[in-house]
Image (cartoon, helix red, strand yellow):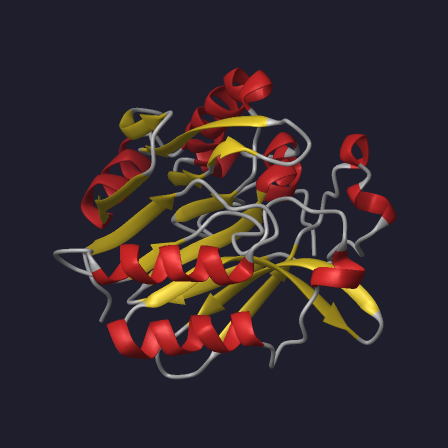
Amino acid sequence: MGSEQLYITLIQPDIAWEDKTANLQQYEATIADITGPKQVVVLPEMFSTGFSMAPGRLAEPMDGHSVRWMADMAVKHRCILTGSLIIEEEGKYYNRMLWVQPDGHIGIYDKRHLFAYGSEDQHYTRGERRTIAQVNGWRINLQVCYDLRFPVWARNLGDEYDVLLYVANWPEQRSLAWKTLLQARAIENQCYVVGVNRIGTDAKNNNYTGDSSVFGPLGEMLWQQTGIPACRTVKLEKEVLQKVRNSLPLLNDADKIRLL
């Protein structure tokens, strides 16, 4: 039996540039202050460092400090903790989204679409497979930042998932695209879409306004926050999702182009 509700907590921080200690301390305090259900807690892309192109200096193995910290937080707060880190594995670097459960299981999604405009493709290895995580009967498609611009990669073929979850470091100058594409993904896939971004300014003078958002399966905005740090828990309803899909069975008519 699954749950009819899913509680997702979005944490929108000002990330300290390449300062893992300061960032983890900030998140630890924020998570401790969450009131109400702690079911899935979401941190942004490269949450411990900011969007850095220095993996040789910053990358950690899967048994490194930041991953262990995520596991400790998941156990302590009896929640799933997710977000992306710079990970080194077999001599390669990945922008890797981790899905860390309190039972010790860790799911992974390696970012598929690397941001060549920011030279990410010169430093990191792209992922090859989608990852759909599960919690209490809910299926969650894990995606990272630039993946948002490629709708085929996120396409919901029939009834594959219930939530699209994007973690990002998406700058202010392209915030219109961020907000518009999150809403579009919700409409075209008849699913909830959750986008978690950062605020502040990084070492490259990129400014971030956050605009972390939750959209419903008709594209309706359920929550959005701009310009300030935020920690917000949003309740998703399975009944709403099923009602939309049953009354408007549009996914049945989708082109059946299956990806990995």
- Quadrant in which residue 230 is drawn: top left
Residue situated in front as seen by the camera: 245 or 112: 112
Q: Quadrant of the C terminus?
A: bottom right
- Seen in the picture, residue 40 relative to 229 is either above or below; the reply is below
Q: Which residue sits at x=28%, y=77%?
A: 76
Could you say where residue 84 lies in the image, as x and y percent from the top left?
56, 56
Residue 78 visible from this viewpoint: no
- Seen in the picture, residue 79 relative to 115 is either above or below; the reply is below
Instruction: Name the outermost residue toward the left.
Output: 36
Q: Which residue sits at x=40%, y=47%?
A: 163
Could you say where residue 200 lies in the image, as x and y percent from the top left?
48, 32
Could you say where residue 116 lies in the image, as x and y percent from the top left?
81, 36
- Quadrant in which residue 209 is drawn: top left
- Quadrant in which residue 164 is drawn: top left
Q: Which residue sits at x=37%, y=55%?
A: 26
Could you say where residue 80 lies in the image, as x and y percent from the top left?
35, 67
